[in-house]
Amino acid sequence: METRTDYATIVVPTCLRYELLLTASTPISHHDPAVQDDSNRMLFNRQKQLLAGPFDATMPSREQVEAILAAHQVPSDIADLFDDVSLPEFVATALTRIFLDLYNSNDGEGLFSGMERYARLEARLRQSAVRSQTLRGLWNRLCDAMQVSVHGGEYDEALWRVFALPAGFGSLVLRTLTTDYRSIVALARLWHTTEKRRNPDYAAKSGQPVAGPLVMVNWPEDRLAPHSDAAQAVEVPCVTGNSLRHQIVREPAWLHLCQHLGIAEATPGQGQIPSGCEAIFYNGGNIEAGAKQPSNVFSLAWRARENYPSLDLVGGVTDSFDLGESRLKVAGWLVCRENREALRGSPAYDLPAASISVFDMLDEVTLTRQASPHGEGQMIYTFETLAAGTQILCRLNLSPFTPLLTRGALVAAVDTFMANGANVGGQGSRGFGHCVGDWLTRPDDGDVRAQYEAYLTEHKDELRAWLCDGTLGTGARILS
């Protein structure tokens, strides 16, 4: 009797992790695309992040609250407008109103002058709040940004009543100014102008009635709710994964492919490669308006991905359909104290920079565009940067069962990025964002780059012809 033993093969899908450490040799510039204001000051890109405590969650004592309310009484005409205002909003409004009292004259002062004075104040108030860790720091930055002079001593006590509030409560005021700066400025302006109407001469000139007496806002105990000391939402500077994905992988992968296929640079749409073919490799491409998908989308997509491993790596869209999800997943973290827990399990966790706050790495740079010989066109602008020496951990994960040639395309792209002068962020032409890159973690999968390049060399003529005819080897024209 024959005995048969069956053995099961167990396959455990695992992703492949590649980690790259970038160390900035020049300051990194990465402006925040969400900030659209008219100022000539640009903040470094930030994203909200939940940080674990402990944090100072101390709220002002009742005595401190009473002192603040006594120092910042409001005209009785508008006292009811503060009924639904939180204490952080009240303090933020009071601080803004002090600025208006000090610097809002007929001619104004510094940048707080002319018809655009309030637009400038809004933009710089928010920027100063984002960049500050304390209310004192906010005031210093705001006065510098608005280019106003040293104020007189009559407001010193009122200011220091605000500055002396607990740091944890101060962070709530800063957060309010970051998100609600427009309504805060509006309420502060109303407070400022209403208080001026207490002067009969001013009221007569403005054609409005004389404002009532100053009164102290009543703040019940139940409106002083404490906040958490276990965690805090913080706007943390960051270099986006989207930026890293393009600069480290997608663009270098295209340059590497052009080099091995002998494709020369030309004006887009006027060379041998259709603009749509170039676009799908360089930035992912675009589906044409009103395009109708063919019936065999899945087959066409996988043939294109198989022929061009770099498209399998980062994906893209043709004239009428998407190639499907890319194999590559990109994430990036600044190596700093705020991100240290995210670095756990990586060699970057033990780097000295992981114990330094990212806010200590921020710097401010002012550049000047020179005027023409006739004195025209000069422009001065200021922006935040991360200091030279800042480090970025880039984690490049490949999906389970990623083909060998696709893995080779990733390694070739990163090696090309580092060999051609690694650069992250913006303003590289002005000397910003130059980096030195080192592999921290890399799977032991042989020389996959050599095998990928051997594939490109062996199929050079057909791969190039498929780019020129827009078929990508699918048998149908899918790009134009």
Image: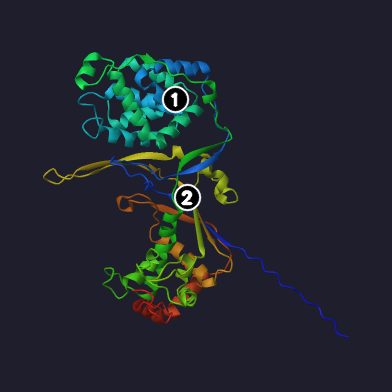
User: Which residue is more in the foreground, 322 or 160?
Assistant: 322
**Residue 359's spot in the image, x, y percent?**
45, 38
Q: Which mark is residue 83?
A: 1
Q: Which mark is residue 392?
A: 2
**Residue 40's spot in the image, x, y percent?**
28, 41
Q: Earlier in the sequence, mark 2 or mark 1?
A: 1
Q: Is residue 372 above or below residue 230?
A: below
**Residue 404's spot in the image, x, y percent?**
54, 71
User: Which residue is more in the foreground, 51 or 221?
Assistant: 221
Q: Is residue 225 left or right of residue 361?
A: right
- Dot 1: few (<14), some (14–19), or many (≥20) neighbours within 10 Å? few
User: Which residue is more in the foreground, 293 or 470?
Assistant: 293
Q: The N terminus appears in which quarter of the rendering?
A: bottom right
Q: Give SS at disc 2.
A: strand
Q: Residue at x 24, y 29 (%)?
A: 110
Separation of disc 2 and disc 1 at Cα? 47 Å
Q: Residue at x 31, y 30 (%)?
A: 144
**Residue 64's spot in the image, x, y percent?**
49, 18
**Label 1 sits on what residue type?**
Asp
Picture quadrant of residue 230: top right
Q: Is residue 199 left or right of residue 467?
A: left
